[in-house]
Amino acid sequence: MTETLLELETRLVQAKEARHRLLTGTQEVTVSLHGYGSTTYTAANVDGLEKYIHELKTEIAKRTGTARRGIIRTSF
C-alpha cells in the first residue's frame, strides 16, 4: 500500500499527539499503523512510539526531498 504524503503527515501528527498524551499522564493510547491495523502504546513502551515517529519523519523527508545525511565520522 503506497501512502500519500498527506497520509504520512496525518499519521505523524497523530503519533506526536499520542506521545504527548502518554508523557502527560494518560495511561495508554492507540495509534493506526500504516493501514495494517493499530497498536496500543503505554508509558512502558514510549520508545516504540518514538521509533514510529522517527520512521514517519524519515519517510516524509524522503518524499519531500529534505532527507538528511548521516553524521560523517573521521578519525586521525
Image (spheres, grey):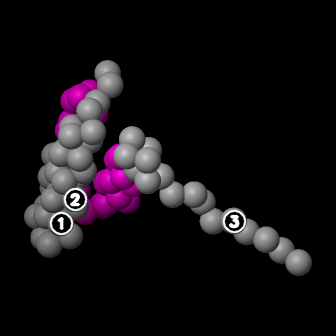
Q: Quadrant of residue 4?
A: top left
Residue 46 drawn at (x, y percent)? 31, 60
Q: Residue at x 43, y 53 (%)?
A: 66
Instruction: Give the amino acid at mark 2.
Output: Lys
Does 56 appear in magenta?
yes
* Residue 48 relative to residue 21: left or right: right
Asked if residue 52 is positioned above or below residue 3 in the image, the reply reads below
Judge by depth and name the residue closer to the eye, 61 or 10. Answer: 61
Numbered label attached to residue 72: 3
Instruction: Give the amino acid at mark 1.
Output: His
Q: Earlier in the sequence, mark 3 or mark 1?
A: 1
Numbered label attached to residue 56: none
* Residue 35 relative to residue 70: left or right: left
Instruction: Give the amino acid at mark 3.
Output: Ile
Judge by depth and name the residue closer to the eye, 53 or 66. Answer: 66
Crowdedness of circle 3 by 10 Å Cα count: few (<14), some, many (20+)? few
- In front: mark 3 or mark 1? 3
Asked if residue 29 is positioned above or below residue 71 in the image, the reply reads above
Residue 5 drawn at (x, y percent)? 27, 39
Judge by depth and name the residue closer to the eye, 68 or 51. Answer: 68
**Picture mark count:** 3
Q: Are marks 1 and 2 in contact (CB under 8 Å)?
A: yes
Q: Quadrant of residue 31?
A: top left
Label 2: which residue?
16
Label 1: which residue?
20
Q: Residue at x 57, y 57 (%)?
A: 69
SS at mark 1? helix
